[in-house]
Amino acid sequence: MEYAVLGGGALGLMAAYRLAQAGQSVIVFEQEKIAGGLAAGFQVEEGSDIWLEKFYHHLFRTDKTAIGLIQELGLGERLEWLRPRTVSLVGGEIHQLDSPLTLLRFKPWRLDERVRVGAVLAFLKVVPPQLLEGKKADPWLRRWMGRHVYEMFFESLFISKFGGLYDQIALPWFWARFHDRSTQLGYMRGGFQHLYERLVERIGQLGGKVLLGTRVEQVEQVDGRWQIESSQGRWTFDRVISTLPTRLTCRLIPALPNDYRARYDWGQAYGAHCLVLTIDRQLTASYWINICDRGYPFTGLFEHTNFRSPAEYGGRHILYLGSYRPMDDALFSMSKEEVMAEYFPALKRILPTFDASQVTESWMFKAPFAQPIVTTEYRAHIPPLQTPLAGLWVANMFQVYPHDRGQNYSLELADRLVQELLQQ
């Protein structure tokens, strides 16, 4: 079979790699000039082999597929496990909350509230997500954790991430956020870009191709074969796998029937936005700062070099300021300078010693369709892998439910897809 894979992110590259291993002919089309999709990196110093992710990433111990792939590709020695500090901004003060012990010491809550939260989280660790279907996170957490705890902490995080849709999020989504977590976090020395560069290399060695900087312009079925018109020319294939968001796939392939579109071209997704700063000093002692207080323009602060050593980045201290917003939000049309002008006063409220003069370098990245809005109706609108059109398959982040977006679950879905493909 001759396969086209649309999208060179984790899912597309993994699918192409497994198909190539199985002796199939495969070409990946990726419009960006670098592979990796939402997990792609950039070089802090041009020409070095040290990459930094455009959007902060790490692995959990539960990410078995990603860990196994890294080892399979001979990159296991780059994978390191650390336990960085996670804290939360509550009532203008920083409090550590990243383990059962720190939960018991969490001062903003009374002792009985801490025990209650611990019991709820322990329940979520063991309950099958199927038992939570049809329930919204907001009323369920408000009831079982208590109104005071919920409104002080979790409601604020929901609002920060989902804005006006915060009370529509399905409980299984919240389940996954805690069920999948581990206190230890994994990171590849030199950045996860090494994983995606190695996948591109292996695909090539197995006879496949990855066409970077190649935009797919038209996909149509002609005489039982698929024709792809791209910015680099035209190709014909037996099968097409689209790893693009379902909505984009529907736009690209007009032949998809109306009933398919009505059911699966559905729902909302927010875009991701990250301002990445190089600072001339360490700002905090923590890797991850959740913002539970209202009125901040970013979702959280992530001081990457409290997770990795500044020495890996030429002595730089690296800070991410991340946000999720509707894709028509004004943030996505602002210049980097405008974003910094809005963010820096808010950053100084959290860290009074911060000053703009401490910033030595800055980058800004944005990506559409980065965070699906997982409501209670979401599950009914997850498309099957095989579409009604012969030879057209769809596999994307929308289908990893109830797990949240992430490298591991994209890789896992790719494995499942290829197993299904090879059986037909």
Image (tube, rainbow, N blue to C red):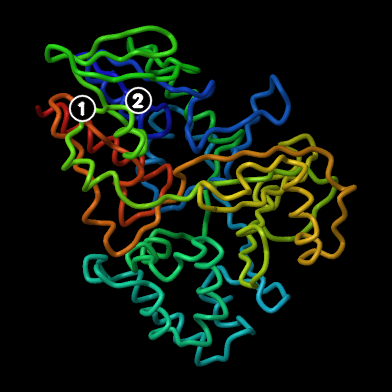
Q: Which mark, by number, is residue 351?
A: none
Q: Which residue is mark 1?
A: 255
The residue at 46%/52% (across/down) is 60
The residue at 76%/48% (across/down) is 340
Res. 120 image quadrant: bottom left
Q: Which mark, by number, is residue 6?
A: 2
Q: Vertical placement of 350 versus 36: above or below? A: below
Label 1 – label 2 distance at C-alpha:
17 Å
Q: Secondary structure at mark 2?
A: strand
Q: Would you say 418 lies left or right of 62 here?
A: left
Which quadrant, please, contains the N terminus? top left
Between marks 1 and 2 in the image, the one whose residue lies nearer the viewer: 1
Q: Residues within 10 Å of mark 2 (few under 14, many from 20)?
A: many
The residue at 18%/33% (across/down) is 419
Position in image of residue 394 (x %, y %) = 26, 34
- Observer-nearest of 267 and 149: 267
Q: Would you say 203 lies left or right of 330 here?
A: left
| First reached walking from the N terminus: tag 1 or tag 2 | 2
